[in-house]
Amino acid sequence: MTRFNFNGRKTLPSRGQAWSELQEAMSDLRSGDADWRHGRTPLHVYYAGEDVLDVARQAYAMFISENALAPAAFPSLKRMQDDIIDISLSLLGGSDDAGGTMTSGGTESIMLAVRSAHRAFRERRPQARPHLLLPTSAHPAYDKAADLMGLEVVRVPIGVDYRACADILAQHINEDTMMIVASAPSLPFGTIDPIADIGRLALERGVWLHVDACIGGFLAPHVAKFMSGLPRFDLSVPGVRSLSADLHKFGYTAKGASVILYADAEDQEHQYFEYFDWPKGIYRTETLTGTRPGGAVAAAWAVMHYLGEAGYRALAQRVMHIRDRYIEGIDRIPGLHLLGKPDLSVIAFASDRYDIHDVGDAMEARGWYISRLSNPAALHMTVTPGHDQGVDDYLSDLERSIPQSDRPALRSQSRTVVTY
Ligand SMILES: Cc1ncc(COP(=O)(O)O)c(C=O)c1O
């Protein structure tokens, strides 16, 4: 049997190795990974059960070699992408004028929205130095997009309820503001920003509003079927120009799947890239990447059809029920409190009595993979259907991880938190 050396800089093996050996080696490698199957991981994996995973896996494998860059060669993938966009638009308030594109993930969807907003802005004000106006809670993918496109970013505080605040945003809009972002929900706090208010502001001031529904896009429409009072956030809200929603999160499909949607398909035209002066002819792409995995498209199409509305609703009910169990359990532990009022399944909790990051360390020592916030210091998680296996153990370990004597929470505030 071939021995695998995982130390030092690797070179290509001189001879090929048997799959059985490789599989064993990879299983060994994986032994130190976070345990998402049993609800011990607070983010990164959205596990809806072996059956869903199996559908995604088989569909991915069926189209593993096909390239979604080439609709002429693979009309199957074009058909599937068109279906995925139609379904997404029907779930997320798209009218007959709306349009969209499938992408590789939230970051790419966001970059395309920024590119479209920038090009639309430049048509109106070619000499300006445009900026993006972001609440502090918005995902850093906007800063990444701005960095790549040479744009400025203005970050403004959120309200005491951990939501973006239309009045604060209004104070910072000027003629160079090319885009405002609102989240549904934000990753740190799980709150949906007041998108109707921000949409009104965007219309009044003529600014592009992008809704980041990367987390909530494929969860909220199903939650809204059985829970009243969820804030409106989709393309039907006046003022919303574009919206990103990740299929590889609460769409439960394989990684590499998201959508960027536009309330008006004409806005989508800005996102395309065309190059004409190439010996091979016109090069035209709709997204940032060239070659795109057919497997990611096929898996998304298959999982959406496998689950259907009833399947997604049942999973949404499960998620919200598990979330409530976490919230009740956290509320029962003296000294802990939730940050804000989470609308969906992302929760963050802090303490005025303990160093919450010490509590996180103690949880890690008990084998949990822990997600943290640095400011304010808090522990954090995105609840998924897979967490039903972990909720009771998590809460009892959390209780045991609370220090016996009270200690000031100050040290946590300055601790560097590396999440990614
Ligand atoms: C609100 C939000 N926006 C954007 C992203 C980026 O998505 P991705 O990691 O798929 O690029 C994330 C990822 O967690 C997110 O939570």
Image (cartoon, rainbow, N blue to C red):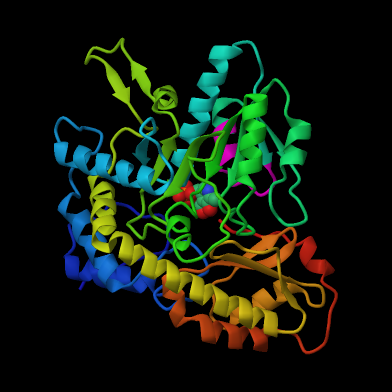
**365 versus 210 height, above or below:** below
Residue found at x 38% / y 65%: 313
Which image quadrant is residue 341 in? Answer: bottom right
Measured from the top left, where is residue 11 in percent x and y? 32, 52
Measured from the top left, where is residue 376 in percent x and y? 75, 60
Is residue 361 or residue 269 the one in the foreground?
269
* Residue furthest front in the image: 228
Residue found at x 14% / y 33%: 73
Magenta-colored stretch includes residue 137: yes
Quadrant that contains the N terminus: bottom left
Please give the range of residues in magenta.
Answer: 135-146
Image side of residue 40 versus residue 136, left or right:
left
Q: Is residue 150 visible?
A: yes
**389 versus 337 height, above or below:** below
Is residue 132 or residue 91 the one in the foreground?
91
Q: Is residue 32 visible?
A: no
Measured from the top left, where is residue 62 in percent x and y? 15, 53
**404 versus 53 height, above or below:** below
Which image quadrant is residue 196 in? Answer: top right
Magenta-colored stretch includes residue 40: no
Which image quadrant is residue 348 in? Answer: bottom right
Image side of residue 267 versus residue 330, left or right:
left
Residue found at x 29% / y 20%: 283
Q: How many marks?
A: 0
Measured from the top left, where is residue 47 in percent x and y? 38, 68
Quadrant that contains the C terminus: bottom right
